[in-house]
């Protein structure tokens, strides 16, 4: 038998090792770096990591490895980080660092308390981050995470936090490997990889299959003597560049059969079967435990005396099927080896061994952190009663450590097992029944952002209700279902269920259940247009909530009244209600209701045109969501969108794009729509990749906000391409998709109609100039249809008009319609549009100025047109809006407009913003100070200053101020002396 050396050489990886060594050097210099190492199973990821880890250790770095383990459909929260903490705890150098961060002891089974409270999960993440930072201060640290494709969601979240917000200026390197060929389209690791690779500290390294010459070198290096060329060629052919395949094929070359197996599994089993029977028994047992197994646990499960076990292990280690760890554990050298041995077990043998591991783990004491493993082993051993109990215990543990996705999966596993377990064997306790478990799973799903799954689970709870079910529980199921249905825009069904829930519980005597049923019914009624019912129930329920002192329900009802009573959230009464609601929700500890209040406070400011006032509410709301672990819930996602929208509207485009990139690092796939304002920026800067990204938002289950964002981008993109057919098609399909079950169209209809109208008006003007009156009439008819729709939607059903933004888009739609119809002089209406967008939308105001300038040219007012084009050019340059700049330059050429102002009227040269900047220049302000006072970036202030110097023909800031004083462009500041 051909014997392999103790460690395979690393061949064909010089470039990759050099790159990783460079990363380590930067990390040792104080710059946190991370590398995602991808490759197919067996391509050599672990071997490369071992090699570079040895180099790191030789250079004085601390090297710690955390392994992710495949536990089937459920995971053990934070497993690789728990392993890392175990290594740190065993090293006296880091005892001080561990003592400074006691919150992380929860992952080691020590400590008390829950990280499912409002900020426990954040403390855990920050504690782990702080610990690693302090460890890296003791010695440069290399953190290796192996098999990331098996990572549980909580570990993925912690890694996202660590790299996105964590130790950015410490001596730390993170190398994380994963199997690229295991990542199917819906694999949960895919979104995280997409987020991480956008971080500046993260890079990706793909280990591709080795070239044939490198495999040849590898195979020849494995042997202790010369190998026949034919044998080497055959191994190279079969290995197909995979180092592990090559090693396994080499190890099986000198078998009694003299042949090479046709598949890798056969090769692995052939090597396995060459072991003595006792060693085979030990490997079979170890395969059931997973990738790694503790020595004591393996001995007890295998039922062998210590001497026999050690002899068998020596055989397995010598043949490189197992690797001995420093922590008294044994691991399969490769996961594929373990999988092959496990798959070869007989069904009864597999079940027996799983049962043995389950009982052994239970015998060690029902440690919460082992519950997931016990649940897995009990389930595979068909001990369903114990599997059910362990699944519930694992769910409780996941809840305590702030892992809602794992909690949901364990609860769903328990629900699957429930009917197969007799009533006498189920967990006892009044709070444990199938309906309440299903409701709990629904809540966990909603907390994790799985809204459609939350609906499905609540429907299952409803189906489980019997005739003798307690009426309060039956009502709770129905109003929970109604709330979940509202979150996925199933409005009519939500109203029906909330109505049922309210009817099942008497108003007297007052109860918490009735109050919350009423609060849910208020929302549902409002969404289906039953405004009188909503107001009546809200006022009645508020009185009951006040009497019962249910402060979070009071808050929820006050928010509903603030939104749709009187002037709504834009008015002073609505604002005061929302502020009171925020305080009530905060005092009760109900974070979701508090977030709802903060979101509506921000929206009230936005709708009234007070854009700057939005920002503090949004900042507070997102910070509250972060501390509560609710960043995946609906209101924080909408707050992120609104924050980016405010930056977009104010013209702070670079900030908008940066903030969107930062959000993408921490948000789930369900929050992709929040980057919408950044897509608006991308499109306005001439990059039509924004349209492709918008189409991607329409994939998967219907999402209202994602559809809105996609509709805006795709309609505007078609207009920019001068494709009126496509613009109208996207506008109509978007409005149709966003129209609710009652037939109510969305407010954004006005904006969509105006965007489509710009393309329609271009087409009508073009046809008319070409002499095609019939074609022009067709587009004019379309324009009339669209403007009528905009007029209808600009005023809501209750008679209240939309806010400044909606009214500005209506005026623009009217102006585009006039342009399409070749109506009366359009200069006055376009001047009105420019004024309407003066509430703060920098880009749209500039686009309307361009239309105004075109109208001025048509009217022969060329000097005024030239002044407008100068404003548009300046804005386009500041924003980087390339298409707008090209359009204004075309108008200047077409209209033969001078880009130079009249020489003796310098005041007309300066825009209003430049005059503000000039006034602050005269006070000696720096660019940064100017930016802070005018709420613009220092870079933007610098551009304004440069424009002022050019327009005033000044060579310095001081000279510009002197010219301004001399020519009366600014007046001296009044004296404050007595």
Image (cartoon, rainbow, N blue to C red):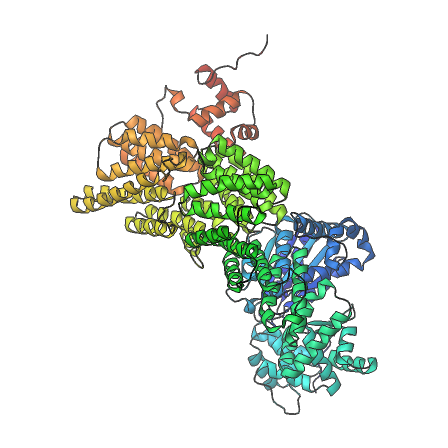
Q: Quadrant of residue 204?
A: bottom right
What residue appears at the point 59 percent right and 71 percent down from the top-left corner?
41
Image coords of residue 472 (percent x, y): 56, 54
Residue most extreme to the top: 978
Which residue is more in the foreground, 362 or 468?
A: 468
Rendered view: 537 above or below 961:
below
Rendered view: 862 above or below 966:
below
- Split into 4 quadrants, where in the image is the N terminus? bottom right
Which residue is more in the foreground, 916 or 292?
A: 292
- Split into 4 quadrants, where in the image is the C terminus? top right
Q: Is residue 519 visible?
A: yes
Rendered view: 776 above or below 472:
above
Image coords of residue 345 (percent x, y): 64, 82
Residue most extreme to the bottom: 257
Q: Quadrant of residue 384?
A: bottom right
Count of all numbered marks drawn on residues in the image = 0
Q: Is residue 913 left or right of residue 596?
A: left
What residue appears at the point 76 percent right and 51 percent down from the top-left corner?
102
Which residue is more in the foreground, 766 or 296?
A: 296
Q: Is residue 576 left or right of residue 166?
A: left
Image coords of residue 331 (percent x, y): 71, 73
Image coords of residue 300 (percent x, y): 78, 77
Q: Is residue 846 visible?
A: no
């Amino acid at each position: 038998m051909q014997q392999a050396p103790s460690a395979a050489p690393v061949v064909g990886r010089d470039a990759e090792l050099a790159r990783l060594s460079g990363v380590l050097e930067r990390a040792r210099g104080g710059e946190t770096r991370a590398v995602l190492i991808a490759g197919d199973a067996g391509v050599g990821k672990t071997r490369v990591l071992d090699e570079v880890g040895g180099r790191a250790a030789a250079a004085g770095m601390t090297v710690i490895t955390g392994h992710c383990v495949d536990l089937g459909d459920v995971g053990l929260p934070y497993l690789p980080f728990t392993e890392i903490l175990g290594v740190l705890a065993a090293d006296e150098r880091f005892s001080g660092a561990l003592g400074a961060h006691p919150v992380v002891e929860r992952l080691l089974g020590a400590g008390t308390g829950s990280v499912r409270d409002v900020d426990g999960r954040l403390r855990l993440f920050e504690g782990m981050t702080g610990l690693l930072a302090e460890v890296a201060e003791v010695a440069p640290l290399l953190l290796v995470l192996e098999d990331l494709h098996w990572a549980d969601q909580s570990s993925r979240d912690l890694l996202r936090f660590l790299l996105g917000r964590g130790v950015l200026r410490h001596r730390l390197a993170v190398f994380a490997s994963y199997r690229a060929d295991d990542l199917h389209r819906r694999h949960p690791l895919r979104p995280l990889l997409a987020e991480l690779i956008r971080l500046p500290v993260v890079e990706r390294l793909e280990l591709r299959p080795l070239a044939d010459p490198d495999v040849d070198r590898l195979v020849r290096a494995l042997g202790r003597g010369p190998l026949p060329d034919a044998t080497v060629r055959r191994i190279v052919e079969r290995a197909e560049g995979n180092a592990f395949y090559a090693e396994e094929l080499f190890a099986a070359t000198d078998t009694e059969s003299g042949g090479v197996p046709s598949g890798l599994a056969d090769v692995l089993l052939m090597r396995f079967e060459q072991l003595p029977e006792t060693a085979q028994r030990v490997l079979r047992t170890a395969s059931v435990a997973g990738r790694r197994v503790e020595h004591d646990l393996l001995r007890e499960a295998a039922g062998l005396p210590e001497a026999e076990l050690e002899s068998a292990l020596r055989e397995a280690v010598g043949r490189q099927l197992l690797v001995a760890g420093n922590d008294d554990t044994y691991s399969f050298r490769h996961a594929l080896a373990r999988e092959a041995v496990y798959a070869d077990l007989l069904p009864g043998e597999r079940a027996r061994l799983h049962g043995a591991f389950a009982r052994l783990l239970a015998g060690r004491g029902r440690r919460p952190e082992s519950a997931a493993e016990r649940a897995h082993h009990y389930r595979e051993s068909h001990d369903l009663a114990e599997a059910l109990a362990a699944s519930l215990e694992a769910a409780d543990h996941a809840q305590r450590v702030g892992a809602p996705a794992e909690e949901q999966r364990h609860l769903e596993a328990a629900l699957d097992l429930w009917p197969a377990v007799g009533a006498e064997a189920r967990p006892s306790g009044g709070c444990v029944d199938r309906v309440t478990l299903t409701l709990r799973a629904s809540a966990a799903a909603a907390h994790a952002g799985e809204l459609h799954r939350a609906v499905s689970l609540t429907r299952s709870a409803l189906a489980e209700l019997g005739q003798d079910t307690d009426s309060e529980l039956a009502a709770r199921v129905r109003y929970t279902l109604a709330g979940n249905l509202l979150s996925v825009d199933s409005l009519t069904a939500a109203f029906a269920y909330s109505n049922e829930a309210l009817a099942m519980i008497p108003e007297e005597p007052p109860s918490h259940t009735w109050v919350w049923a009423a609060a849910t019914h208020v929302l549902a009624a409002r969404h289906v247009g039953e405004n009188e019912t909503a107001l009546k129930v809200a006022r009645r329920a508020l009185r009951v909530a006040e009497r019962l002192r249910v402060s979070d329900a009071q808050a929820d009802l006050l928010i509903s009244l603030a939104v749709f009573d009187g002037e709504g959230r834009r008015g002073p009464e609505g604002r005061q209600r929302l502020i009171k609601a925020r305080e009530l929700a905060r005092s009760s500890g109900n974070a979701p209701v508090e977030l709802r209040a903060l979101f509506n406070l921000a929206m009230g400011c936005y709708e009234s045109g007070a854009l700057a006032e939005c920002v503090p509410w949004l900042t507070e709301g997102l910070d509250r969501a972060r501390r509560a672990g609710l960043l995946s819930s609906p209101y924080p996602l909408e707050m992120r969108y609104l924050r980016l929208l405010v930056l977009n509207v104010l013209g702070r485009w670079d900030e908008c794009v940066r903030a969107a990139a930062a959000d993408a690092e921490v948000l789930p796939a369900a929050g992709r729509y929040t980057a919408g304002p950044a897509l608006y920026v991308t499109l306005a800067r001439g990059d039509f990749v924004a349209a492709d990204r918008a189409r991607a938002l329409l994939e998967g289950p219907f999402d209202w906000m994602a559809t809105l964002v996609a509709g805006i981008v795709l309609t505007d993109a078609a207009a920019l391409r001068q494709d009126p057919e496509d613009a109208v098609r996207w506008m109509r399909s978007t409005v149709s998709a966003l129209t609710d079950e009652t037939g109510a169209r969305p407010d954004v209809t006005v904006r969509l109609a105006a965007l489509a109208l710009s393309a329609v008006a271009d087409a009508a003007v073009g046809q008319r100039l070409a002499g095609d009156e019939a074609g022009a009439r067709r587009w004019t008819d379309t324009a009339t249809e669209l403007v009528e729709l905009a007029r209808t939607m600009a005023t809501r059903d209750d008679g209240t008009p939309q806010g400044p933004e909606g009214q500005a888009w209506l005026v623009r739609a009217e102006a585009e319609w006039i342009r399409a119809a070749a109506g009366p002089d359009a200069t006055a209406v376009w001047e009105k549009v420019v004024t309407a967008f003066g509430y703060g939308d920098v880009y749209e105001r500039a686009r309307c100025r361009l239309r105004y300038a075109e109208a001025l040219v048509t009217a022969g007012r060329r000097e005024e047109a030239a002044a407008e084009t100068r404003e548009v050019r300046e804005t386009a340059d500041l924003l980087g809006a390339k298409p707008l700049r090209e359009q204004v330059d075309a108008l200047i050429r077409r209209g033969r407009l001078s880009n130079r102002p009249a020489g003796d009227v310098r005041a007309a040269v300066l825009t209003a913003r430049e005059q503000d900047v000039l006034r602050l220049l005269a006070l000696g302000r720096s660019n940064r100070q100017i930016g802070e006072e005018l709420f613009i970036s220092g870079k933007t202030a610098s551009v304004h200053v440069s424009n002022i110097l050019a327009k005033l023909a000044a060579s310095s800031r001081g000279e510009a101020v002197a010219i301004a004083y001399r020519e009366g462009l600014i007046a001296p500041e009044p004296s404050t002396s007595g």
